[in-house]
Amino acid sequence: MTATAEKLQKRVGVRETLNHISVITKRNMLRNIRLPQLVFFATVQPVMFLLLFNFVFGGAITEGTPAAPEDYINFLIPGILVQTAVFGATQTSLGLTEDLATGIIDRFRSLPMARSAVLAGRTIADLVRNVFVNTLMLFVGFLLGWRFEQGFPSMVLGVAIVLLFGYSMSWVMATIGLTVKSPEAAQTAGFLPIFPLVFASSVFVPVETMPSWLQTFAEVQPITILTNTARSLMLPEEVAASLGLDTGTLILQSLAWTAGILLVFAPWAVRQYRRAVD
Amino acid sequence: MYAVEAVDIVKTFGDVRALDGVTVRFEPGIVYGFLGPNGAGKTTLIRVLTTLIKPDSGTARVAGIDVVTDAVAVRQRIGLAGQNAAVDEYLTGQENIEMVGRLYNLSPSDARARTDEVLERIELTDAKDRQVRTYSGGMRRRLDLAASMVGRPEVLFLDEPTTGVDPGSRLNLWDLIEELVDTGTTLLLTTQYLEEADRLADRIGVIDHGRLIAEGTSDELKNQMGGDVVEIHVTDDDRGSAFAALTRVATEEPKQEGNSLTIPAPNAAHTLTEVVRELDAVSVTPRDIALRKPTLNDVFLTLTGHKAEEEKKPAPSRGRRRQS
Ligand SMILES: Nc1ncnc2c1ncn2[C@@H]1O[C@H](COP(=O)(O)OP(=O)(O)OP(=O)(O)O)[C@@H](O)[C@H]1O
Ligand SMILES: [Mg+2]
């Protein structure tokens, strides 16, 4: 053993890091498929939400929606995509806190693996999960009569922007989870910011129906921006125009929010991870 | 070069001095056993040596490499099976080991071949396609051991490898660990069981309250007791008078464990005869009397004033307390 003579590896190389990320991503994807409660939250629950909002609230909410009454599903689907992606992001905090609790993170840390792989592998697996859930939403929506009006590329662009935003929200949830540490607390703390953001937004109803103080908040917050972006890429152009901003501006605003959240929360999550494990 | 060299390691958690200046060195190719009761600092020492926590002061080298400044290089050369099995419940046995192999930077095909090899060795081949949550505690332990071996580590760390395992599985695990040692891996293990240290370890470090209080081979430690002991078993009623009788023979107080009393027997058979005579004088007939070699339990009592295996706690096979 001539360990001191050979050159010691100081850090994990780029290729190795990418391998580690893919290994951890695969592991988390297997868990997402195999844990019954995760499968439930990825299938039954979002479908139930979609059906409830469409049939129970649809009629009442349709008053004042820009789209015609029979088209509530067309109004709803872009919003549901955003809601699903954001709710799905809470999976990230749950997964990370469970890993902390079982001690598997200690095993990972004793291995010559890139530290970043734990967080990257988690968030990427949750992104894949969101791709699946949103595809399911579109499929069920299609059965309920949803149609996109501006061509396939626009629709896909809208979904992609929403998924990217969901990815940035995963880092917010990672930060929260690694701060509170226990899975139970992570569940509660994660939904705390999400509920007001999702419900005080244009996801289910046009913001004009809200009291003016709430409208002010609802108009500027990212969930509304994202929802409006998806709508302006999927609804008929004249309806999209009634959203107030042109599609290009909305897309830019959505991407700016996504980038901003990532810039703040990715480093923050990494810091909280170090604090949680060291 | 030493396989492990720790010098004056101190680690505190709040006001708890988990490690209070531990120095230990040993050469490659041996089995080193840390023996100590609950809370002695065994796990903390393992966590320092496996780069999971940084010591407050002191230096540690594993395979000649500094664990603080060259953590990545150390991790390439070690394997760890922590106190609680760190395996993924929802992956199969094979998926678990392959994942760890890939994280040791084995290629996909190497990882697979090596996984087959260690699973075979650990006798889990039949269960390899089952999710781990269907495994028994002993199987989980074995899988954890497999995970720690898959990267062909130079130094392997096993933290209480048989705690919480039923006696039959413990014997199996011992065989496995002994086999492992035949292949030349340096092994550091911790245990609360004297029997385990006695059976597996070439050298033993006795650790208590964050300090290494004695070190040596099993025989050396036993010799610290000054040779043979006389041990008697008496009934509840006789215990008091027997204690007094033994005190008259020995220069020190007898060690007492339930109804068994032990004193050093520097003059062997002569001491034994004296004991019989004194017992007879107070009309005590022992239920059992023996002149024997001291066990590590005697050593532990002598060194620490308390037994090694008191307040034994069952190790949960899943879930664990956070330790950092
Ligand atoms: N993360 C921590 N925070 C606070 N105290 C800790 C922490 N880790 C260990 N300790 C304390 O340090 C001391 C040594 O603990 P350690 O886990 O190293 O003991 P051990 O010998 O492994 O015991 P056991 O046989 O129970 O596993 C104990 O008093 C323990 O409570
Ligand atoms: Mg311990």
Image (spheres, rainbow, N blue to C red):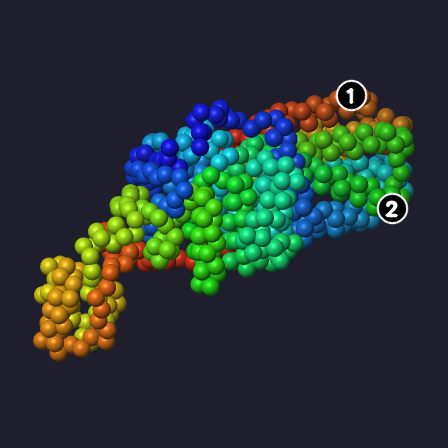
Indicate left or right for B279 with B150 as reference. left
Where is residue B222 shown, x and y percent of the image? 25, 54
Foreground of the two, A167 or B64? B64
Q: Amino acid at mark 1?
A: Thr
Where is residue A244 shown, x and y percent of the image? 81, 25
Mark 1: is the Cβ under 8 angstroms from ligand 1? no
Choose the circle earlier in sequence order: 2 or 1: 2
The residue positioned 44% from the left and 48% from the top of the image is B181
In the figure, residue B260 lies in which quadrant?
Answer: bottom left
- SS at circle 2: loop
The residue positioned 42% from the left and 30% from the top of the image is B65
* Chain to which the residue tagged by mark 2 belongs: A
Residue A105 in sight in this render: no
Foreground of the two, A214 or A219? A219
Q: Amino acid at mark 2?
A: Leu
Where is residue B209 shown, x and y percent of the image? 29, 46
Residue under circle 2?
A144
Quarter of the figure that contains the N terminus of chain B = top left
C-alpha distance separating marks 2 and 1? 30 Å
